Amino acid sequence: MPPTTTVLRPLGTPLPVGFLGLAAGAFIVSALQLGWIPPHERHAVAVVLVAVAFPLQLLAALIGFRARDTAFATAMALLATGWLVQGILLSAGPVPEARHTLGLFLLVTAVALLAAIAAAGAGKLAASAVIGCAALRLALAGIQQLTRSPTWQDAAGAAGVVLTVLALYAATAFALEDTRGHPVLPVGRHGSGARAVEAGAEPGIRPLL
């Protein structure tokens, strides 16, 4: 019986594009929640979510699965569908009857993201911190939808601003690491992923992005 050969193909890391899509979606929604964008521009916000945040995070998810990082890819897929749902509902206009559905959807997505973080472990602390903050923002937004409380809306908006900063930092750090072949900004790598980066292994070859 002839030996079986497995060929691994190096890939560009999808972490930067995924986190940039997340930053764009989080910031524009937070701006709407905090009153920086007037309510009558909600259709423009919906366009940003559907045309920018959703496809960028979907692309990151697909490449992440290709690179065998199931935890990251799952988180990106969950966030991508979240932007799509929110964008479609926003484009339809204010529909009070949908707030319970949206609120529960956001809450269950937040819980699902915690499962992705648990699967990722401590391999990439910066990436896990971003996903954790995204889960917090979704939970706060879900509670706001269910309660219609301005306090929860402000809390969700503030969490979105923090998430934007974290996502931009992570996107920059992972992009620099991928283009230069070594860590430039701290991303909190541990275990086999850190050893693989130190050895020069590329995404698609090493066990974690």
Image: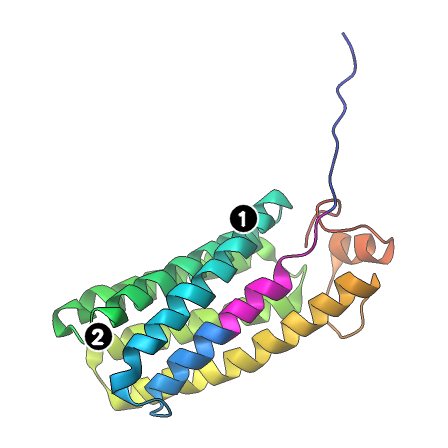
| Dot 2 amino acid type | Leu
Q: Is residue 104 above or below residue 24?
A: above
> Between 127 and 58, which is closer to the camera in this rendering?
58
The answer to the question of whether label 2 and label 1 lie on touching residues, with beta carbons closer than 8 A, is no
In the rendered image, residue 199, in percent from the top left (x then y), is placed at 87, 53
Q: Is residue 159 above or below residue 70?
A: below
| Dot 1 amino acid type | Leu
Q: Secondary structure at mark 1?
A: helix
Query: In this rendering, which labeled residue sits more in front, label 2 or label 1?
Result: 1
Residue depicted at 38% across the width and 79% down the height: 29
- Distance, label 2 to label 1, CA atoms, is 32 Å
> Between 51 and 71, which is closer to the camera in this rendering?
51
Q: Tell me which segment is drawn in magenta.
A: 11-23
Quadrant of residue 72 within the rendered picture: bottom right
Residue 188 visible in rendering: no
**Residue neighbourhood size for the residue with mark 2, other residues' Cα within 10 Å, grouped as few (<14), some (14–19), many (≥20):** some
Residue lying at the far left of the rendered structure: 97
- Residue 97 shown left or right of residue 175 in the figure: left
Q: Which mark is residue 62?
A: 1
Residue 184 visible in rendering: yes
Magenta highlight: main SS: helix
Counting labels gives: 2
**In the rendered view of the protein, which quadrant contains the C terminus?**
bottom right
Residue 21 among those drawn in magenta:
yes
In the rendered image, residue 15, in percent from the top left (x then y), is placed at 62, 61
Which of disc 1 and disc 2 is earlier in sequence?
A: 1
> Between 121 and 204, which is closer to the camera in this rendering?
204
- For disc 2, the marked residue is 146
Residue depicted at 51% across the width and 61% down the height: 56
Q: Is residue 154 above or below residue 160?
A: below
- Residue 2 shown left or right of residue 106 in the figure: right
Q: Secondary structure at mark 2?
A: helix
